[in-house]
Amino acid sequence: MIEIDNLTDFEIEVEFLEKISNYFANSKDIELIVCNSEYIKDLNKKHRKKDKSTDVLSFGIQDFLVLGSIVINIDEVKSKASFYKHSFYNEFCLLFIHGLLHLLGYDHEKDFGEMRNKEEEIIKHFDLPTSLIVRQV
C-alpha cells in the first residue's frame, strides 16, 4: 500500500503507482511525499549534506511492514517533463520507479548496471518513456 502525503495540488493516480509497486511482489508499505523544490532542498541538506534541490529522494526504513519513503519534487517533474517532451504523469512515474529501486537496495552510483537494467525492464513493462538513468548515458 502507498500512503501519500501530498503537499502540492498535483493529483496522483495511486492505482498506477500501486501496479508499479506490486510488480516487485513486495507487500511492504511505501510512504510517498510529493513536495516542491524548497521542501526537498531542506531534506537534501539535512540528510545528505547537499545544499541543493533534487528530483527524488528515498529513505529506507528497516521495518517489517514498511519499505521506506519516497519524496518527489513536483517542480522538477514539471521541468523535466517539458524538457523531455513527455507527460507530467509519466515523469512522475519515472521518479517513483527510481526512488522505489533505491528503496529496494539498488544504487546506480555503485553498481555495475543492475539498477539501469531493472529500470529499463520496468519502463518497458509499463510502456513509459526513457528512464532517468538511461537518458543520462
Image (cartoon, rainbow, N blue to C red):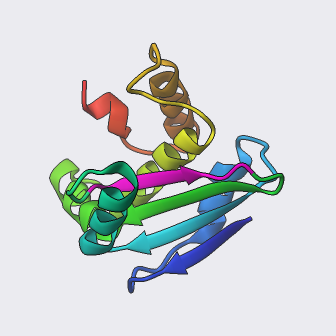
- Single out the residue that lies furthest toward the bottom: 9
Residue 48 in the figure: left or right of residue 21? left
Q: Quadrant of residue 109?
A: top left
Q: Which residues are magenta?
A: 54-62
In the image, residue 98 lies in the stretch drawn in magenta: no
Q: Quadrant of residue 80?
A: bottom left
Residue 127 at what x, y percent from top left? 50, 43
**Relative vertical location of residue 7 with respect to residue 125 in this rendering, above or below:** below
Residue at position x 55%, y 28% from top?
A: 118
How many labels sit on residues? 0
**Relative vertical location of residue 107 with respect to residue 110 in this rendering, above or below:** below
**Relative vertical location of residue 125 with respect to residue 36 in this rendering, above or below:** above
Q: Nearer the viewer, residue 57 or 127?
A: 57
**Can the viewer see residue 89 in this picture?**
no
Q: Nearer the viewer, residue 65 or 27?
A: 65
Residue at position x 29%, y 59% from top?
A: 45
**Relative vertical location of residue 23 with respect to residue 5 in this rendering, above or below:** above
Locate the C terminus by quadrant.
top left
Q: Nearer the viewer, residue 11 or 4?
A: 4
Residue 109 in the figure: left or right of residue 84? right
Residue at position x 36%, y 61% from top?
A: 46
Residue 20 at what x, y percent from top left? 63, 50
Residue 36 at what x, y percent from top left? 30, 74
- Single out the residue that lies furthest toward the top: 112
